[in-house]
Image (cartoon, rainbow, N blue to C red):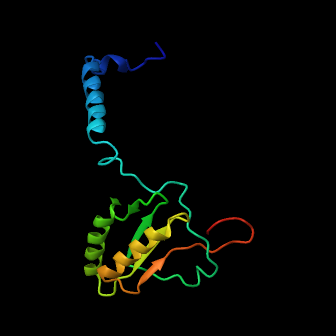
Amino acid sequence: MITRPLDLASKLRPEPRNFDVIFLVNGGLLVLFFMFFGSSSVLEPGLGVDFKLPELPGALANAVTTTSTISVKNSGQIFADGLLSMDQLREWLKIEVRKTKHPSLLVRMSAGVPVAVQNAIVSAARDAGFGSNIVLAAEEPVADGTRGR
């Protein structure tokens, strides 16, 4: 026939046997994996889309480069190298101070974080050795209503 001049279909390998059982076992193992190692180990929680920095005139003029960064949500969750409790944060800060000669810390707090949490974090950073090199992040207010850069 003109449509099959080289008869390539006869030179192909035969179709493989049916491996549907193996695919089902693989799917079951994946489901078990995510059940046993849920969001606390595999799917690390992160900052949501509702994270908004407070607005402060002159925020960009006072911007500096820092060596370490932490983020704090309204709920009091602290993120550095993952989700940390206040005791874990104190240990993390001590480790970060030892990494550089002149350590500085950027604290990104959502606009609704209570002042008590802010004070506890700043106190822990000072006790760890950051001294006065602690910067609280803020956004520059924009007149036309758009945010950020």
Considering every residue shown, the one lying at the far right of the view is 144
- Please give left or right for residue 36 compared with residue 143 in the image: left
Against 29, is 125 above or below? below
- Residue at 30% x, 21% y: name it: 12
Q: Nearer the viewer, residue 21 or 73?
A: 73
Q: Nearer the viewer, residue 11 or 65?
A: 65
Against 123, is 34 above or below? above
Give the quarter of the image for residue 128. bottom left
Q: Nearer the viewer, residue 147 or 135?
A: 135
Give the quarter of the image for residue 129. bottom left
Against 132, is 9 above or below? above
Q: Position of residue 82 (x, y in %)?
A: 34, 59
Question: Can residue 16 be seen by looking at this rendering?
Answer: no
- Residue at 33% x, 87% y: name it: 102
- Residue at 50% x, 65% y: name it: 113
Q: Position of residue 8 (x, y in %)?
A: 36, 21
Q: Quadrant of the C terminus?
A: bottom right
Question: Can residue 92 be seen by looking at this rendering?
Answer: yes
- Please give left or right for residue 98 compared with residue 107 in the image: left
- Please give left or right for residue 100 compared with residue 60 in the image: left
